Amino acid sequence: MKSDVVNVLVLVGSLRAQSVNRQLAEVAIANAPAGVRLQLFDRLGDLPFYNEDIDIEPAPEAVQALRDAAAEADAVLVVTPEYNGSIPGVLKNAIDWVSRPYGNGALKGKPAAVIGAALGQYGGVWGHEETRKSFGIAGPRVVESISLSIPTKTLDGKHPRESAEVVGKVCEVVEKLVAEVG
């Protein structure tokens, strides 16, 4: 750790302003325990598609901002939906950028957790598994025991902060992730 504060990078796999996954990220940020700072990187939509031809110095500005945020982080929390049974393209693109340089990306060895909500009855389990797999190959240390998949229908159209149970589960996820920081 670089300081007394644990910095957690938060990536949301949906670009939609009112997405339930963005709302879950807001719950995590608003309820961060003392000594923990969760920072949402809200520019995944600005990243160009990964292309090794443009992965040169200087990196595109949005890419450098993501890599800098990842370098400053002690851990990463990914909050993502499932798109067609898999990982959203915008999130996969971010993983590709942050995994470089190959074998030495800015999140290498840092704990990562994947949670989220989706329309299906299983709350995005397939998409979360694909995200864990991709991140595991990209360099972070995915904490497989941290999991939260919420079927959006269980929220009944309400913001997740209105469910004490959901808030409690999100807080538990953050606490477990922070405990993994060495």
Image (cartoon, rainbow, N blue to C red):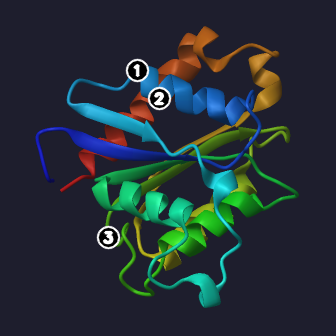
What secondary structure is found at the residue carrying circle 3?
loop
Characterize the local packing of mark 1: few (<14), some (14-19) or many (20 or more) Cα atoms within 10 angstroms.
Answer: some
Callout 3 amino acid:
Gly
| Vertical placement of residue 154 versus 57, above or below | above
Gap between marks 3 and 1 measured at Cα: 25 Å
The residue wearing badge 3 is: 109
Query: In 3D space, how far apart are the residues under numbered discs 2 and 1 (Cα atoms)?
Result: 5 Å
Instruction: Give the amino acid at mark 2.
Output: Ala
Q: Amino acid at mark 1?
A: Asn
Q: Which residue is mark 2?
A: 28
**28 horizontally vs 95: left or right:** left
Which quarter of the figure is the C terminus placed in?
bottom left
From the viewer's perspective, is residue 122 above or below residue 23?
Answer: below
Disc 3: CA contacts within 10 A as few (<14), some (14-19) or many (>=20): some
Asked whether disc 2 touches disc 1, contact meaning CB atoms under 8 Å apart, the reply is yes
What residue would you read off at disc 1?
Answer: 31
| SS for dot 1 | loop
Q: Position of residue 146 (x, y in %)?
A: 46, 48
State whether residue 13 is above or below residue 31.
below
Q: Residue at x 55, y 83 (%)?
A: 55
The x, y position of residue 42, in whole percent, is 57, 43
Circles 3 and 1: CB atoms closer than 8 Å: no
